[in-house]
Image (cartoon, rainbow, N blue to C red):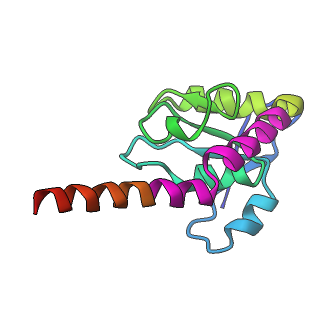
Amino acid sequence: MSVLVTGATGFVGRALVELFGFRQDIPNLFAQSNIVTLPSFYGEGLPKVLVEAAACSRAVITTDHPGCRDAIEPGVTGLLVPNRDAMALADAMEDLINNPAKRKQLSQSGRALAETAFAIEKIVDAHMRIYEGLLKSNEAIK
């Protein structure tokens, strides 16, 4: 199903947004994309899709919602829009569609953030520290 997005300079009348439904081939989908959006207002925690998008050097647009906003550095590695604000989301998408240099900068900065802040080694290390702390506190109780 294609959705028509109008107003983007030079793109009026072209299908710019496609709704795919459930997919299992996310790496292929990211390879075909320039921008990944997650306009969520639910309690996501840290959405893995935003970390994966950044790791794939894709520009990110997400909501100013706990978890979502924690996956990016606003204006540096992605764009934040207010919750439930479709016009702000559309404006952010139009901005990145019409500004390939900005899109590229966000993509490159997002990749660097993913490599440093979200590297699997850092995640495993953080989890191990939590588990070790829990074991020590459990031993202190005994």
57 or 38, which is in the foreground? 57
Which residue is found at the position 63% from the left and 64% from the top? 20
Which residue is found at the position 52% from the left and 41% from the top? 39
Q: Main secondary structure of the magenta part?
A: helix
Q: Place residue 95 in its image quadrant.
A: top right
Using the rendered image of the protein, determine whether residue 7 is visible from the camera's viewpoint. no
Using the rendered image of the protein, determine whether residue 29 is visible from the camera's viewpoint. yes
125 or 54, which is in the foreground? 125
Question: Does residue 9 appear left or right of residue 106 in this picture?
Answer: right
Q: Quadrant of the C terminus?
A: bottom left
Q: Quadrant of the N terminus?
A: bottom right
- State the image coordinates of residue 127 (x, y, percent, origin top left): 44, 58
Question: Does residue 15 appear left or right of residue 26 in this picture?
Answer: right
Membership of 5 in magenta stretch: no
- State the image coordinates of residue 65 (x, y, percent, origin top left): 43, 34
Q: Residue furthest bottom?
A: 24
Question: Does residue 132 appear left or right of residue 14 in this picture?
Answer: left
Q: Place residue 112 in its image quadrant.
A: top right
Q: Which residues are magenta?
A: 103-127
Which residue is found at the position 84% from the left and 30% from the top? 98
Q: Residue furthest left?
A: 142
62 or 124, which is in the foreground? 124
